[in-house]
Image (cartoon, grey):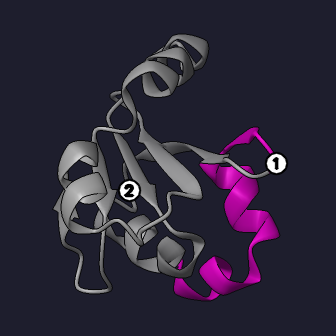
Amino acid sequence: MQIEETIEKIKRNGPDRVLVDEDGETVTPLTASIHYPDVKIEVIFIRKDGWSLGAHSDLIGQAYDLWADHWAFIWMLESNSVTTIEVFLEASEFLKQRH
């Protein structure tokens, strides 16, 4: 997977799915914008196969847990930083406890 190409695709089309609640419900970005207008995507997890999941930072743990063994990168939109999931886990006390 070329992360730069994946990022460009997400910039054009949005993530493949959006996590909208703590129960793990995911929907398309279009459905999220219509039915869940208060859900703000702040992080995007990117799997090893290029599939992506957007989530609000309050749901970062639930998003991680959905595909814990498959994430390759995480993109923090506010800071526009993309890092490997390993580096992110090392820096994240919250997720370190779950991992």
Question: Total of numbered circles in the picture?
Answer: 2
Q: Main secondary structure of the magenta part?
A: helix
Q: In the displayed structure, would residue 74 be above or below residue 69? A: above
Residue, x 52% and y 11% (percent of image)?
A: 5
The kind of residue on which mark 2 rests is Asp
Tell whether 61 sits left or right of 76.
left
Tell whether 8 sits left or right of 68.
right
Secondary-structure class at tag 1: loop
* Residue 26 image position (x, y, % from top left): 21, 62
Q: In the displayed structure, would residue 7 be above or below residue 4? A: below
Residue 81 colored magenta?
yes
The kind of residue on which mark 1 rests is Ser
Residue tagged 1: 79
Residue sitting nearer the eye, 36 or 74: 36
Mark 2 vs mark 1, CA separation in Å:
25 Å
Q: In the displayed structure, would residue 28 be above or below residue 89? A: above
Rendering quarter of residue 84: top right
Residue, x 47% and y 77% (percent of image)?
A: 59
Secondary-structure class at tag 2: loop
Residue sitting nearer the eye, 27 or 69: 27
Q: Quadrant of the N terminus?
A: top left
Rendering quarter of residue 13: top left
Residue, x 51% and y 68% (percent of image)?
A: 56
Which segment is the magenta one?
79-99
Residue tagged 2: 69
* Mark 2 and mark 1 residues within 8 Å of each other at the beta carbon: no
Q: Which mark is residue 30?
A: none
